[in-house]
Amino acid sequence: MITIELPWYSKNMSPNIKKHWAVKAKAKGVDTNAGYYAAFSHRKAVDALKPKNGKYLLDIIFHPPVKRKRDADNAISACKGLFDGMAQALGVDDSLFKINSVDFGEVVKGGKIVIKIY
């Protein structure tokens, strides 16, 4: 099992935010870079994992920056850039990620996303 801590996603990546496509593209680029650098040190460890049924199982725990009700589907959608960067750093196709569980943890200053891959 690998545990990766990602930063909180850019607010402009939320599917509920109506922004110009260029603003969303810039936010996705920032998130992709953040996901890449957060996961890069785990590149060798992922080689030791054998995907179950061809998929890597993910347990995701969102630690939001502020206490507010959150929607799990929207939070996962907002993480597209982070997941793309993480997959690129690990050298795997993100289509091999299967979300096993999603949960919300305690509030953390700045927010973070903890991902367990097995």
Image: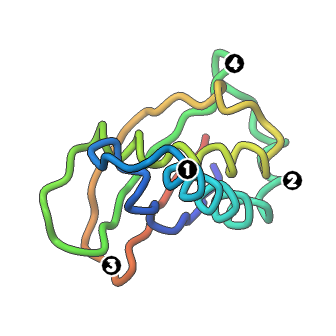
Q: Contact (CB < 8 A) between labels 1 and 4? A: no
* Residue 83 figure quarter: top right
Residue at position x 31%, y 46% in the image: 18
Q: Contact (CB < 8 A) between labels 2 and 1? A: no
Amino acid type shown at disc 2: Lys
Residue ID for mark 2: 44
Left-right relation of 59 to 14: right
* Residue 31 figure quarter: bottom right
Q: Nearer the viewer, mark 4 or mark 3?
A: 3
Inter-mark Cα distance, 2 to 4: 18 Å
In the picture, the disc for residue 22 is 1
- Looking at the image, tell me whether mark 4 or mark 3 is earlier in sequence order: 4
Residue ID for mark 4: 54
Amino acid type shown at disc 3: Val
Q: Nearer the viewer, mark 3 or mark 1?
A: 1
Residue at position x 66%, y 26% in the image: 96
Amino acid type shown at disc 4: Gly
Inter-mark Cα distance, 3 to 2: 29 Å
Left-right relation of 59 to 66: right
Inter-mark Cα distance, 3 to 1: 29 Å
Image location (x, y in percent) of residue 71: 21, 45
Residue at position x 59%, y 57% in the image: 26
- Looking at the image, tell me whether mark 2 or mark 1 is earlier in sequence order: 1
Residue at position x 41%, y 39% in the image: 77
**Of all residues shown, which one is farthest toward the left?**
69
In the picture, the disc for residue 108 is 3
Q: Residues within 10 Å of mark 4 (few under 14, many from 20)?
A: few
Inter-mark Cα distance, 1 to 4: 35 Å
